[in-house]
Amino acid sequence: MQHYDNFIDGRFVPASSTERIVVRNPANGHPICTVPDSSPGDVEAAVAAAERAQPAWARRPAIERARVLREIAARIRQRVEPLARIITEEQGKTLDLARTEVNFTADYIDYMAEWARRIEGEIIESDRPGETILLFRQPIGVIGGILPWNFPFFLIARKAAPALVAGNTIVIKPSEETPHNAVKFAEIVAEAGLPAGLINIVHGRGPTAGHALASSPRIGMVSFTGSVETGSAIMAAAAPNITKVNLELGGKAPAIVMADADIELAVRAVKASRVLNSGQVCNCAERVYVQRSVAQEFTGRLAEAMRQTRFGDPLADPTVDYGPLINEAGFRKVDRLVRGALEAGAELVTGGKRGPDERGYYYEPTVLAGCRQQMEIIRRETFGPVVPIVTFEDLDEAIAYANDSDYGLTSSIYTRDLNVALRACQEIRFGETYINRENFEAMQGFHAGWRKSGIGGADGKHGLYEYLQTHVVYLQRY
Ligand code: NAD
């Protein structure tokens, strides 16, 4: 078994602490590798390296910074297969999805590199004779990136690529569940010959290493993706230093299926939401509202589609539709929410229990009909292959149900009626709405949650500008 180190200042360096985190395959519990359980001192060393590297990096023209990013993307493309296997082994997604994640990561880095020539300031009209007001966009400094486990490789790029092209440097703390792919990312960075200190990767647990990063007075922004609870802890850690926070948090996406919808399309898209990555995707449909007149048909067809999905160890059988849940805690949460719904009167249409292979955290594809708005399974993020269905009478009721949530990340509606679609766009209070298509955002969009789903956002021009701060200069002619 390999024992890996942190990546600080362009080198792999042992942590000060001798404690190790053992990474396991969620499909069978086998140990994969270990990474350091880093101390706050290790995090500070990484922040110091990033701080030293940042001024010279920011002085380089953006187009040169972009070249460095493209070099990383090219090297990622040279090893899609080994990277995909590592992601599948520690995270449990299918190999196909892992390959998509790796390719998407390279594409995302190239996309952010394209912004190098498009970072623009403004010239603002002055009230005073002879004065020019200039607004510059400048780097923030050192970024702290704290990552979840569900798209672990892509999320390194989602934070590092905009950070670097904008002239910042970054310290990343991967999830303790999925650090192996981050070690491989660090190896690519090391080979690509980047200036030391631009990208630093420190392993460790949330309350120690993660907290140390979020509370460091030397970072300019903490960019976090993860749960609402941790997002709140990170805001508190950042508060004493008034550090900017960028938070991509959980979701409980509603899908509204109107009576006039293409039911086949809606079934396919909702099923994909709950099967992709074993249902562990923040933007995917987590609760389904179906108009009463088509509820029976939709539920029957969805249950049939879910029954046909196959799950299992994705490395042992690359043809499975989904793999295990990430860990015991994730499995228990899914099971507890399903049991709670059944006790509260939901009807089990299919699934509802652990898969036959008890070595991994497998959950059967599950459909629950007759759910009600107040049930916990409708209100809390489930993160599993489970579809809870609520019926509604008219659009007003569906929109009221959809909006009645602490979360505000994504939403979707299936209808052939343009007026219904437009009304939903105007009245649904979410950062994203998908109309007649599956839930997944584009890199040129802006992924930003309302309410407890986050602050700020990622992707596109607006996501890049999160990594820049403004500097306004008043230039007086005399
Ligand atoms: P999590 O909040 O448990 O952990 C995320 C990271 O935070 C880990 O690296 C962890 O070590 C760290 N952490 C934990 N406690 C900390 C603390 N006190 N201080 C600093 N860091 C701490 O989330 P998870 O289980 O890894 O990921 C799943 C969650 O992520 C889901 O809620 C999902 O919806 C969300 N997510 C959101 C998006 C989005 O774009 N909005 C994308 C992917 C995942």
Image (cartoon, helix red, strand yellow):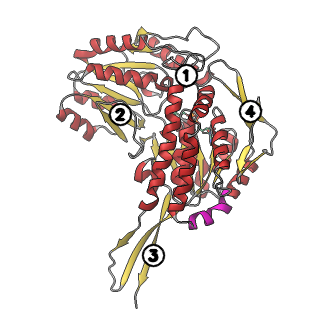
On screen, residue 393 versus residue 56, left or right, reads left
Q: Nearer the viewer, mark 2 or mark 1?
A: 2
Precedes in sequence: disc 2 or disc 1: 1
Quadrant (top left/top right/bottom left/bottom right) for the C terminus: bottom left
Residue 39 lies, in percent from the top left, at 75, 45
Residue 441 lies, in percent from the top left, at 40, 38
Q: Given contact means CB atoms under 8 Å apart, are the residues at marks 3 and 1 in contact? A: no
In the image, is residue 320 above or below residue 225? above
Quarter assignment of residue 417: top left
Read off the residue under disc 2. 411
Residue 271 lies, in percent from the top left, at 39, 21
Precedes in sequence: disc 4 or disc 1: 4
Packing grade of label 2 (10 A; few <14, some 14-19, many >=20) is many
Report helix, strand or loop for mark 3.
strand
Measured Cα–Cα span from mark 3 to mark 4: 50 Å
Precedes in sequence: disc 2 or disc 3: 2
| Region rendered in magenta | 50-59
